[in-house]
Image: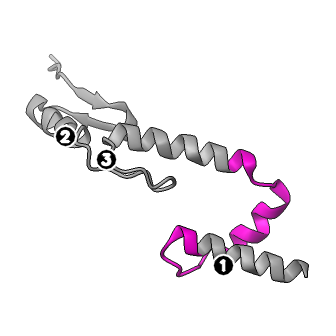
Amino acid sequence: MSKSYQIWPIEQTDEVFTSYDAYLQRMDFYRQKRFICEITGHSGLNFFDALQSEMDASDEVDDAFPDALKEPILRKVQFSTVSRLDSLVDHVFEVKIDGLL
């Protein structure tokens, strides 16, 4: 005879819990307004809002960025040690402008 177990999934993170208390603890954590969208810098978001903001912003960047520049720029920044995104953008812009002049 097989035992049946009740599970509680969190689809956005692909987590599955067999303990309702553990599920509630994790959901309480994810609902705290302590997360930041890594792309826009918006803060004070819960995990799910931050995740959605990142996906939306990523789609916007992908749509707005010229396909012809994607490969060379990604090759240039792939192993970059620049820690701030705005500094990386400035660096790429300077390199591309220098290459065009």
Looking at the rendering, the stretch of residues picked out in magenta corresponds to 62-87
Q: Is residue 81 above or below residue 40?
A: below
* Secondary structure category for the residue under label 1: helix
Q: Is residue 68 magenta?
A: yes
* Other residues around mark 2 within 10 Å, as few (<14) / some (14–19) / many (≥20): some
The answer for how far apart the CA atoms under marks 1 and 2 are is 39 Å
Of circles 1 and 2, the one toward us is 1
Residue 96 location (% of width, % of height)? 80, 76
N-term-proximal mark, 1 vs 3: 3
* Other residues around mark 1 within 10 Å, as few (<14) / some (14–19) / many (≥20): some
The three-letter code of the residue at mark 1 reads His
Q: Which residue is mark 2?
A: 26
Which residue is more in the foreground, 94 or 8? 94
Q: Which residue is mark 1?
A: 91
Q: Hey, which residue is sitting farthest top in the picture?
A: 1
User: Which residue is located at x 36 percent, y 37 percent?
Assistant: 48
